[in-house]
Amino acid sequence: MPRIASGKRYAQAAFELAMQRNELESWQVSLRKIAELSTDEAFTALVENPKLPFEVKKSLLEERLGDVNPLALNLACLLVHRGKLGTTGNVSREYDRLLDAYHGIEHAEVVTALSLDEKDKERISSQLGEMVNRKVIVDAVIDSSVIGGFTAKIGDMLIDGSVRNSLDALRRNLVKVSK
């Protein structure tokens, strides 16, 4: 859990810096490159090796990343120094969410029992968008315990239209009536 929290903090700091410098898209591209590089476990182990001098680590990062935002490169160096290069996937995803929110786009985690096709995603996205008065992107998750229907989480708001929830409500009502 600490990796996610620190990823959010780094993303927030990067976003605020990008806003100040009017470099939102440049940072997004750079963070994605760094996140992609961090998936190379051998490279990550090499640059996080404490025996390797920092200047060598920095030059390896510069070589592998190519043309990236210089301040994003500094962030990569900081993460390498702290042994947290692996968090850049979280940093990049959180930065993308912050950028989407800035552009008026919300993400909804929609949990269903079966996979959704694009038409279903668009329909749910449209319905949720009307509820929150913003464009909504559906991030679909499959969970058979939902039985049918769906649950959606947008920020702090939870919408539970699942069959499981309906059955639980029916059970609670039946228990109340029988008392």
Image (tube, rainbow, N blue to C red):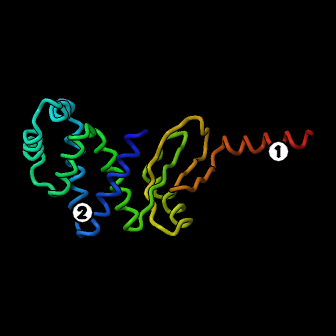
Residue found at x 27% / y 69%:
20
Q: CA distance from mark 2 to mark 1?
A: 52 Å
Q: Position of residue 58 (x, y in %)?
A: 11, 44
User: Closer to the camera, 94 or 146?
Assistant: 94
Residue 25, numbered label: 2
Mark before the other along the chain sequence, 2 or 1:
2
Residue found at x 20% / y 54%:
72
Above or below, 172 against 95 in this view is: above
Above or below, 89 against 71 in this view is: above
Q: Position of residue 110 (x, y in %)?
A: 51, 49
Which amino acid type is shown beneath numbered disc 2? Answer: Glu
Q: In what element is the residue under mark 2?
A: helix
Q: Position of residue 137 (x, y in %)?
A: 43, 57
Task: Name the image quarter holding residue 57.
Answer: top left
Task: Name the image quarter holding residue 177.
Answer: top right
Mark 1 highlights which residue?
173
Residue found at x 46% / y 58%:
122
Quadrant for the C terminus, please: top right
User: Closer to the camera, 111 or 66?
Assistant: 66
User: Closer to the camera, 76 or 179?
Assistant: 76
Which amino acid type is shown beneath numbered disc 1? Answer: Asn
Left or right of 3 on screen, residue 154 = right
User: Closer to the camera, 145 or 35?
Assistant: 35
For mark 2, does the 10 Å Cα neighbourhood hold few (<14), some (14 to 19), or many (20 or more) residues? few
Left or right of 167 on screen, residue 144 = left
